Amino acid sequence: MNLPKLNNFQIDDVIKSALKEDVTSWDISTNAIYDDDKLAKIALISKDNGIISGLDVFKRCFKILDDEIFFVDYKKDGDSIDKGDLVLEIVGRASSILTAERVALNFLQRMSGIASLTKNMIDALDDDNIALVDTRKTTPNLRIFEKYSVRIAGGNNHRYNLSDGIMLKDNHIDAAGSIKRAVSLVREAEPFIKKIEVEVENLDMLREALDSKVDIIMLDNMDIDTIKEAINIIDGRALIECSGNVEIDNISRFKNLKIDFISSGSLTHSAKSLDFSLKNLRYIDEWNSI
């Protein structure tokens, strides 16, 4: 599987904003106790079981403050971790380490929680023929981190933003007057560049979407018997996505259905953060004192 990569130019502005939020002038506690030039080593320890995501973001929080900080890695993004695992060690100025500590942990904990929930939902579905995808129900300004974490755990990304794909939902259809009219309007605006997905809530809407020759049909909040009937009606003429209140305790009901995608907003809006801690700070004499 080709995993995504986060580039510094994509993430630095968000990280800098978070650091500015946490340090409006200076770190009073750290400045009072730690000499700016005093070197230290500290360990990142997992306090939960799960999937790790966000190590590059974690590291960048420190590097933006102090480019001389370096890391000794024991885990990488996508790895399974257990409570008590040593993830990495940080070597650098103690003052820089402690100033960036909380922001770095906040990103790592949030991203690892999303990756862990994604992996658990994939395991609960237990069907390699169906792709689990996220939605746009993400934390403002953190979408790139959250969608990255879904991918790291083996999930897939739905459209990244409103410019990334055509999805006609109930309000679009109401505004246009019908599915047929809505599809016609977007085809005039985007004649061939984008696939068209339509959300349907019943079988009559489904038939209208098929008559309009859309590419993807989202079956929204349908029970399993209706989904099975919809699959037979579609008969391979469009890709099928199922959505609507999909959670880890009910996703298994889709197993072995002939659908292509299951989308779930809970991957990003309901994930519980994994817990990590920076522990065992000790002073060192030289940069290479590992």
Image (cartoon, helix red, strand yellow):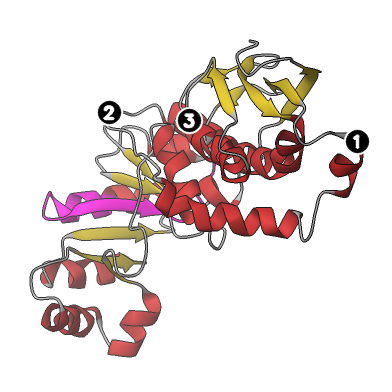
28 in relation to 76, above or below: below
Q: From the viewer's perspective, tell me whether residue 186 is left or right of residue 174.
A: left
Q: Can see residue 109?
A: yes
- For image coordinates 47% across by 28% down, the residue present is 77
Who comes first in sequence, dot 2 or dot 3?
2
Q: Quadrant of the C terminus?
A: top right
> Which of the two marks, 2 or 1, is nearer to us in this view?
1
**Amino acid on which the number 3 mark rests in the picture:** Lys
Q: Can see residue 248?
A: no
Residue 24 pos. (x, y %): 77, 61
Residue 215 pos. (x, y %): 16, 60
**Amino acid on which the number 2 mark rests in the picture:** Met
Residue 60 pos. (x, y %): 54, 40
The image's mark for residue 80 is none
The segment highlighted magenta reads 229-248
Q: Determine which residue is flagged by label 1.
A: 33
Judge whether residue 243 is colored magenta.
yes
Please tell me in which quadrant of the rendered image residue 277 appears. top right
